[in-house]
Amino acid sequence: MEVIKIATAGSVDDGKSTLIGRILYDTKSLTTDKLEAIEKTSKQRGYDYLDFSLATDGLVAEREQGITIDVAHIYFSTAKKSYIIADTPGHVEYTRNMVTGASTSQASIILIDARKGVIEQTNRHFFINNLLRIKDVVVAINKMDLVDYSEEIYNKIKADFSELMSKRDYQDQKITFIPVSALKGDNVVNKSNNMPWYKGQALLEHFEQLDKADIFNMGTPRFPVQYVIRPKTEEFHDFRGYAGKVYGGELSVGDDILVLPSKTRSKIKEIYFYDQKYQTASRRSSVTITLENDINVSRGDMIVKEGDLPTIDKEFTANVCWMDSTQLVPGAKYVVQHGVNKVLAKVDRINHKIHPDYSGIEKDVTGLGVNDIASVTFKLNKPIFYDQFKNHRTNGSFILIDTQSNNTVGAGFIQ
Amino acid sequence: MSTIKKDTSNINSLENEAIYILREVAAQFEKPVLLFSGGKDSITLVRLAVKAFYPAKIPFPLMHIDTGHNFPETIEFRDRLVKELGLELIVRNVQDSIDEGKVKEESGRYASRNQLQTTTLLDAIEEFKFDACIGGARRDEEKARAKERIFSVRDDFGQWDEKNQRPELFDMLNGQINLGQNVRVFPISNWTELDVWSYIERENIEIPSIYFAHTRKVFLRDGLIWSADDEVVYRDAHEEVIEELVRFRTVGDMSCTAAVLSDATTISKVVEEIRESTISERGARIDDKRSEAAMEKRKQQGYF
Ligand SMILES: Nc1nc2c(ncn2[C@@H]2O[C@H](COP(=O)(O)OP(=O)(O)O)[C@@H](O)[C@H]2O)c(=O)[nH]1
C-alpha cells in the first residue's frame, strides 16, 4: 500500500491535537521519552487523564514563538499502512492552508465538537474538502463523553451535516460519520463499549480497510516529460529517454501514443525503472520511456495515449484559491505552472467569487484577496494540455507564480 | 518483464516521489549540488539520484563540508563511493574557515565544529554559485515538523523566512528564484528513519561500518555514550574510558555524535532494532538530545 495522507480540519479546541495524540498513543507510535513527558506534564497539571495534545507540542511551541505553521506533517504506521497526517493548525489564512494540505491528501477527517454541532467553520472545512475532491471523508463527532455518548445528539449532527452534503458539487465523495472521544479513546483506534448503538468502524479501522480504489481516481494516463536523459556514452550512444511520472493510469510497451503539442505519433518502445525494463508503468511511478521513432521531445511536452487527448487550449476557466496579500485583478499577468509546464497567463476576467461556506456566490468583484476562492478565466501565451480537475486531479490543477517575487501566489482547479 | 508494482509498499511510493524531486532539480536549476555528509541519508540520496538519471550519470556534483572531525570510516567510505560511481566530489574544509579567521574554534567540554560548518557551506555556495543544494533532512527528525518545504528558498545569508514560505500544492515544485537566492531541496522529506533503513536493506546499499555494532573505546557523560578519541572529543580526566559494543545512529561530527549500545551487526538487525525502538513503548532508544537541539539551531542559521 502506498503512503496514505490524511488532511485534518477542525476549529480551535475541537480536539484535533488530542485526536492526533490519541492515534499516536494507541498505535504505539510515541517514543518512550515523549510518553514520559506526557505522563509527567499531565500529572503536574493535576489531570486524572493523559493529555495527548502534548504529543504534538512541538507545534504549540512554534505557535507561541509566533512562527506561522501552515501544514504540519505527523508520521505513523501500522502493520498494514503508513500514514501522514497533514494538520493545518492556524486559523488565520485557514482556507489557503487547508487547500494546501488537502491538495496532497487522499482522505480527510473533519472534526466536530458534539456539544457545538455543525458550525459555520464546518461548512468551510467541508467545502474545501469537496472542492479539492478528496475521495474519502470521515466526519468525526468528538467529545462524545461530554454528551453522555448520546445517540440522539450524534444523529442530530449527522442530519445537519447531511443537509450540507446535498449542496456539494462533488457528489461521489464518500462520507463516513464516526462518534469518538479523542480524550478517552472511544472509537479512535479501538472500538468503544460506551456506544453500543454505533455499529460502524473505529476511525483508524476505517482508514486501515481503505483500498487504492477508495482513495485514488483511476483514469486516463498522462505523462508530462520532466527531463530528457541522453547519456552520450559508448554503451548508450543513441539513447534518448523521457523521464517523468505517470499520472492517472498505466502506460505499456507497444501503446500507440501522441506527443503534445506537436501531436507526433509514435509507440512506446521501452519502459525503464533504473536499469530494469518493464512491460507496464503503473500510475505515480517515476519511469523513463523510450519511443520507437526518433522525434524531438522536450520538458513540458506530454505523452498521451492515442484517442485519449486532453484539451489543448490557450484559454481556460478555473476555480482559484488566492494565497497572496497582493490582490489578483483582471489584466494581471502570472506564470501558470501546470505540472512541469510553465506558461505566461493573463487574468481575462473574474467571473464570480465563491463563498466557501455554501452561502452563495458574489458577482462584480474587482479583485481577489488572500483566502478568496473565485472562478477566474485566464488567457495564455501558449496552449497547455489539460483535463478538467474533476476528471484528473493532477492534470487539472495548476499554481500561479508572481512574475516579480517568484512566490507561489495561488492555486487553481480547471473547470 | 513484468508490471512495475509501484503501489505495493510505502517505500516504492517514497522512492518514486524522491526521484521525481531530483529530476525537477536537474531540470529547474542551473547549478545544483548534492550535499554529502557520508551519512546514511546522503548515501540514500546518492542511490536515488543514480536511479533517477540512469543510464546517464548524476548531472550534478557532490559536496562535502568536512569538519575535520569525521569518523575516519566515513571518509574512506566517501572516497570509495565517489570513485565507484564516477562522481564529481567537492570538499570544503571547516579547518580552512578557521585558518582564514572567518570562524573561531570552540573550546571546552562541549566543543564542536557543528556550528562552524554553516560559514564554510555558505562560502562554498557563493564560490560555486550553486542555486540548489540537495540535502537529506527528514521531517520526522524535527520537533516542529512543519517548517520545511521540499523546495525551501534561502536568501544570500542562507536564511529562510519561515513566515513567508511558499505553499506547495499537489506535485508542483516552484523553483523560480530571485538573484542571490538559492533553494534547499529535501527529496526524502517524507521518509522516516525506519523508511531509510528499510530502503538501505532492500537496495543492499553499502554504508560506513560505524553504523553497525562494534567494540569501541567510549566514555559516559550525561547518560550518553561518547567515542573516546582524545584528539577530537574533549574528555575530563575523571571520565573513564571503557569498552562497549556500540553503534552510531548518525555519523556526524565525532564531537557531538553519541553512540548507542547495540548488538546489531547486520543491516537486518539494525532495521529490527529501529523498528522496535520506534514502536515499542519501552524501546531502548537513547535519544541524543543535545545534538538534536543543536541541529535545530543550525538549521535556522543556514545549515541543514
Ligand atoms: N472530554 C473531552 N475533552 C476533549 C476531547 N478531545 C479534546 N478534549 C479537550 O478539549 C480541549 C481542546 O483540545 P485540543 O486537542 O487542544 O484542541 P485543538 O485546538 O483542536 O487541537 C482540551 O482541553 C482537550 O483535553 C474529548 O474527546 N473529550
Image (cartoon, rainbow, N blue to C red):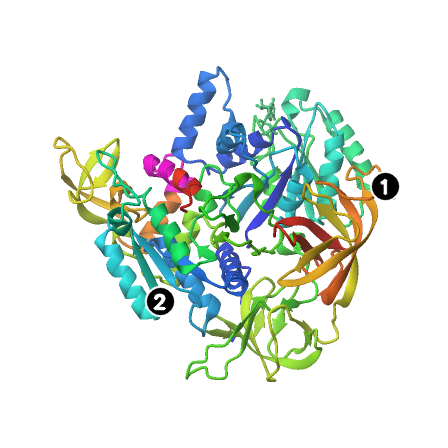
Q: Is residue A122 visible?
A: yes
Q: Quadrant of ligand 1?
A: top right
Left or right of B141? Residue A299 is right
Q: Position of residue A32 (x, y in %)?
A: 39, 33
Give coordinates of residue A143: x percent, y percent. Answer: 64, 25
Residue with the mark numbered 2 = B88
Using the image as rendered, state which of residue A309 and residue A30 is in the foreground: A309
- Cβ atoms under marks 1 and 2 closer than 8 Å: no
Q: Residue furthest right?
A: A363
Tell which subunit mark 2 falls on. Answer: B
Query: Which quadrant is home to the N terminus of chain A?
Result: bottom right
Residue type at mark 1 is Glu
Q: Secondary structure at mark 2?
A: loop
* Quadrant in which the C terminus of chain A is drawn: bottom right
Range shown magenta: B277-296
Residue A362 numbered tag: 1
Three-letter amino acid code of the residue under disc 2: Glu
